[in-house]
Amino acid sequence: MNNPTPHEIQAIQDASEAGGEYLNALGNANLLTMTSDEWMAFNEAVCTGFCESMRTRAGMVMMDINLNNGLPPLCVGDVS
């Protein structure tokens, strides 16, 4: 990902946390010894963590837009 936005950076951090939680629950942090099912579940945890975080952030942006009379947050007060 080139030049990630702050929202994307946070989503990556959230995804990393979700992956770490899966590895802790699995009791195995060695990616080389995972079964294919474990590997798929790990990837699912990471991808889901990223997507859920981005959906949450998109909702936050939409709430900001709604609160600012339909304008993106950076446009408030600068509508010339």
Image: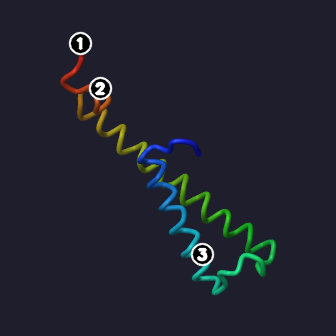
Quadrant in the rendering for residue 48: bottom right
> Is 70 or 43 nearer to us in this picture?
43
For the residues labelled 3 and 2, the Cα–Cα distance comes to: 39 Å
Residue 47 image position (x, y, % from top left): 61, 57
Residue positioned most to the front: 3
Disc 3 marks a residue whose amino acid type is Tyr
Quadrant in the rendering for residue 78: top left
Disc 1 marks a residue whose amino acid type is Ser
Above or below: residue 3 compared with residue 66: below
Asked if marks 3 and 2 touch (Cβ < 8 Å), the reply is no
Q: Label 1: few (<14), some or many (≥20) within 10 Å? A: few
Q: Earlier in the sequence, mark 1 or mark 2?
A: 2
Q: Label 2: few (<14), some or many (≥20) within 10 Å? A: some
Residue positioned most to the left: 77
**The disc label shown at residue 22, or none:** 3
Residue 55 image position (x, y, % from top left): 48, 48
Residue at 58 percent of width and 69 percent of height: 19
Secondary element at tag 2: loop
For the residues labelled 1 and 2, the Cα–Cα distance comes to: 12 Å
Residue at 70 percent of width and 81 percent of height: 30
Q: Which residue is mark 1?
A: 80
Q: Is residue 65 left or right of residue 5?
A: left
Secondary element at tag 3: helix
Asked if marks 1 and 3 touch (Cβ < 8 Å), the reply is no
Quadrant in the rendering for residue 44: bottom right
Residue at 69 percent of width and 69 percent of height: 41
Residue 33 image position (x, y, % from top left): 78, 81
For the residues labelled 1 and 3, the Cα–Cα distance comes to: 50 Å
Q: Which residue is mark 2?
A: 71
Disc 2 marks a residue whose amino acid type is Leu
